[in-house]
Image (cartoon, helix red, strand yellow):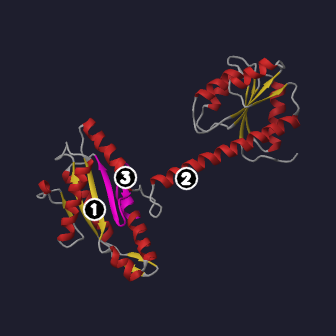
Amino acid sequence: MKHEEHHIKILVAEDDPTSRRILEVFLNKLGYEVTAVCNGKEALQVLQSEDAPTLAILDWMMPEVSGTEVCQAIRRDRRDLYTYILLLTARTQKANIIEGLEAGADDYIQKPFDLDELRVRLRTGCRLLQLHEQLIASREAYHQQASHDSLTGLWNHNEILSLAERELARSRREGTSVGLILADLDHFKKINDRFGHLAGDAVLCEVTQRLSAAVRPYDFIGRFGGEEFLLVITGCDAIDVCNHAERLRACIANEPVVTSAGPIAVSLSLGAVSTDAFSEETAESLLEMADQALYRSKAKGRNQVSIAPELETISCL
């Protein structure tokens, strides 16, 4: 028999052992990965598991939980993973069939079932599942494009601002502090003019990788402008955010970026602020303070960290 499906998981829930075995053998020959159970309770457990099958053949009348009750429970569990459900039924009345479809079944086949008809109906289910997966992939790709910078893959300007505002609100609720760091690549225009824009893009991508590796998994980093980055450092006071900023500065300045145009020395100027001293400030005002601190770093010679005015006496690592 021709293998039509490969590695697609399918659940068979049938209390009659002969029918269950016929289905299991037939579907295995078609190339499905089959899980067979004998009642609705077990079927529901399988379909609600972490790595659940996306196809299910359910007998309508089963012990403990009926096929239609399984349908209803699965449809109430709203997940991105869709389960295509085919009901097996000996009922032929139109009202019964409508009842099964309204319970959440996608299709039905009457007993005694014809294996060729079952094969064709399952092939239709597979096509619909593939379309569903494509829709999810398209939605995720759209979200990625809408929220991330296309070159670096970092959060874009709007998203990193939203994350900063969210973390500031969280810090006020929980009585914790959060730090904001603005980082700007020094003399980036000169890099583009001397080595070309492809080399400039390579520098931005390498700086992104180094910064991403230097922050904690629960911190946030976004591309704030052309060569400017905004980092949201959670749960840290003024000393912490200063030390974070100094580590970021060092991870960029300590080693040149290797590009097709040759190694390029790169450095960052950074401005930092923490909410522990400005707990009532808005995200906008805190960013303004960080921007002023960044400006001071540039005015003092670049490749260094400055912090909000009231915290000037703090020394970093």
- Percent from the top left, x then y, of residue 75? 62, 28
The residue carrying pointer 1 sits among few (fewer than 14), some (14 to 19) or many (20 or more) residues within 10 Å by Cα, namely some
Q: Give the residue type at disc 1.
A: Arg
Q: Secondary structure at mark 1?
A: helix
Q: Quadrant of the C terminus?
A: bottom left
The residue identified by callout 3 is: 160
317 to the left or right of 137: left
* Nearest to N terminus: mark 1 or mark 3: 3
Q: In the image shown, does 107 or 63 lie closer to the viewer?
A: 107
| Location of residue 162 in the rendering, given as x and y in whole percent from the top left corner | 36, 47
- Left or right: residue 171 compared with residue 117: left
What whole-number distance in Å separates the C-alpha atoms at marks 2 and 3? Answer: 18 Å
Residue 281 appears in the picture as rendered: yes
Above or below — where is 92 with respect to 272? above
- Pick whichever, 157 or 59, lies toward us: 157
Q: Position of residue 170 (x, y in %)?
A: 30, 39
User: Mark 1 and 2 residues: CB-CB less than 8 Å, in contact?
Assistant: no
Q: Which residues are magenta?
A: 209-234
What kind of residue is marked 2?
Ala
Q: Does 213 lie within the magenta span? A: yes
Q: Which mark is drawn over residue 141?
A: 2
Q: Is 162 placed above or below 74 here? A: below
Q: Secondary structure at mark 3?
A: helix
| Residue at (33, 43) in percent of width and height | 166
The x, y position of residue 181, in whole percent, is: 27, 57
Mark nearer the N terminus (2 vs 3): 2
For label 2, the SS is helix
Callout 3 environment at 10 Å: few (<14), some (14 to 19), or many (20+)?
Answer: many
Which label lies toward us, 1 or 2?
2
Residue on which the image places disc 1: 247
CB contact under 8 Å: marks 2 and 3:
no
